[in-house]
Every structure is written in C-alpha cells, then in structure tokens.
Amino acid sequence: MTQRIFGKSITELLNFCIRWFVPLFICAFLAILVLFYSDYNLATGSGNLCIILFLLANTYIPAKHLRFVYNFKNVEETFQTLLVYHCIINIAAFTTACVHAYLTNWVNIWLEITLVLMGWLTFGGFLLKFNYNATIKKWIYFLHSQQIVFYVMLFSLLKGHYVI
C-alpha cells in the first residue's frame, strides 16, 4: 500500500509540484536576478525580464513543431509539462510587460498594439485551460494560435522600441 497525503499518492503530489511550482520558481528566480543585478532602473529591468520570460515560455512552440516533423515517440508527458510551463510563464511575461508599460513614461501606438495583442494571445491561451463544447474550444484555439498575430505583435514591439 502506498502512502497517501491529501488523498493523493506521493508520486501524484510530486508530479503536481513539478508541473506547477517549478515554472513559478523559474519566474521568481529570473525576476530576482534581472531586477537585482540590472544596471538600469526598474522600468528597464522589468522590460529585460519580460524578454527573458517571453523567450523562455515560447520555446514550446518550435519544440512542438519539431516533435511532429521528426515524429518523436514517448514524449507526451514531457510536452504536457512544457505546455504547463508555456502557460504559466507566458502569464508571468504578460504581467511583467504590463508592469513595464506602467513604469515607462515612453509610449506610442505601436507599443499599445503590442500590449493588446500580447494580452489577446495570453488570455486566449488562459481560456484554453477550461472545458467548453467543441465548437467554442476550436474557435478559441484558432484565435490563440494564429501565427500572423504573433508576427504582427513582434513587428509592433520592435517598431515601438525603434529597433526597426
């Protein structure tokens, strides 16, 4: 007989902790590193943290494409964990982007477009965590996974920061 805590086995609790608390600790650790060791003010440090979180969270997308291109086997559990990381860290990146936008005195229409599109993609991904009927879930997934929205968001981000 296996030992049970809160009605769950030790393995189930460990899997839960790995899937949900590890990304939160990653976000907190990166936040402390970037904000504490940043040579800049809090507004710039939060922008740097947002970039790091955004890149870290969205490594799931090319990994998912590579999985289907090369037909990897027995990786379903790993990708479920990566999906949880993708969701949590993207929410942290969007929250950091909102803090960065609030703290920065510098704003233009391109950065506002970026924040709206990033919020749209983040909120759409958050809605996918809930159960709906098949038609609604299909449309939410369709609106969340549009690559053109992602590329327009990246273009407006770069244009708003006067990179291009």
Image (spheres, grey):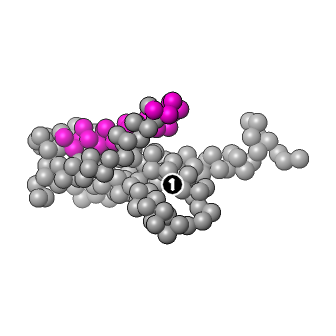
Asked if residue 22 is positioned above or below residue 7 in the image, the reply reads: below
Q: Quadrant of residue 163?
A: bottom left
For this rendering, which residue is in front, 151 or 85?
151
Q: Is residue 76 left or right of residue 43?
A: right
User: x%, y% of residue 50?
Assistant: 31, 50
Residue sitting farthest toward the front:
135
| Residue 25 inside the magenta-drawn segment | no
Total marks shown come to 1
Query: The C terminus is located in which quarter?
Result: bottom left
Q: Is residue 83 left or right of residue 40?
A: right
For this rendering, which residue is in front, 146 or 89?
146
Q: Please name the predominant secondary structure of the magenta segment in the image.
A: helix
Q: Which residues are magenta?
A: 113-135
| Residue 122 inside the magenta-drawn segment | yes
Q: Is residue 86 left or right of residue 55?
A: right
Circle 1 residue: 82
Check disc 1 and give the amino acid type. Answer: Leu
Residue at 55% of width from left, 46% of height from top?
Answer: 20
Question: SS at mark 1?
Answer: helix
User: x%, y% of residue 73?
Assistant: 60, 65
Q: Is residue 95 visible?
A: no
For this rendering, which residue is in front, 87 or 2?
87
